[in-house]
Amino acid sequence: QVHLAESGGGLVQPGGSLRLSCAASGSIFGINAMGWYRQAPGKERELVALISSGGSTNYADSVKGRFTISRDNAKNTVYLQMSSLKPEDTAVYYCYANNIVNGIEYWGVGTLVTVSS
């Protein structure tokens, strides 16, 4: 089993910045992609950004140029630096990881990001 511990959510004004962190622990052998999804009220969960163990990244069009995903493999931690935040970025952000060996996907419990003045 893999446990994903998220931190860094909160309230920020439009145009502000916030950094999310997610640390993986447990049976982490085989973990490949890690990243973030988000779910806004009344909407479906959507991809924000993913990063592979080799550093390849994938971003949603809505966050390109504003969000940066990074990863510290030694710490089994993934980060999401969010800048130029907009009210429409308000959502619960979920950490995600997948195991390339057994195909299992893991999710964190989510952290709320609210962008409001």
Image (tube, rainbow, N blue to C red):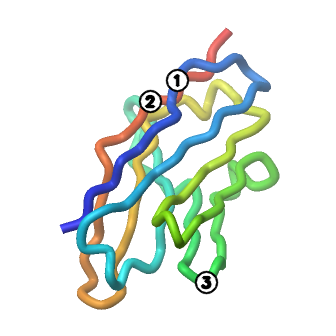
**Location of the C terminus (image quadrant):** top right
Q: Say if 18 sits above or below 71 in the image.
A: above
The CA span between labels 1 and 2 is: 6 Å
Nearer mark to the viewer, of 2 and 3: 3
Classify 10 Å Cα crowding around label 2: few (below 14), some (14-19), many (20 and above).
Answer: some
Numbered label attached to residue 30: none
Numbered label attached to residue 112: 2
Q: Residue furthest left?
A: 1
Give the residue at x 38% y 32%.
42
Comparing 48 with 61, the one in front is 48
Label 1, secondary structure: give it: strand
Give the residue at x 52% y 71%.
74
* Residue 102, quarter of picture: bottom left
Give the residue at x 53% y 59%.
78
Please indicate whether residue 9 sits to the left or right of residue 28 in the image.
right
Comparing 59 with 16, the one in front is 16
The residue that mark 3 highlights is 54
Classify 10 Å Cα crowding around label 3: few (below 14), some (14-19), many (20 and above).
Answer: few
Classify 10 Å Cα crowding around label 1: few (below 14), some (14-19), many (20 and above).
Answer: some
Q: Say if 12 sits above or below 47 in the image.
A: above
Residue 69 picture location, percent across and down: 65, 58
Q: Are marks 1 and 3 in contact (CB under 8 Å)?
A: no
Q: Are marks 1 and 2 in contact (CB under 8 Å)?
A: yes
Label 3, secondary structure: give it: loop
Marks 2 and 3, the one that precedes in the sequence: 3
Q: Amino acid at mark 3?
A: Gly
Give the residue at x 65% y 77%.
55
Residue 34 picture location, percent across and down: 47, 67
The residue that mark 1 highlights is 10
Marks 1 and 2, the one that precedes in the sequence: 1
Q: Amino acid at mark 2?
A: Leu
The CA span between labels 1 and 3 is: 30 Å
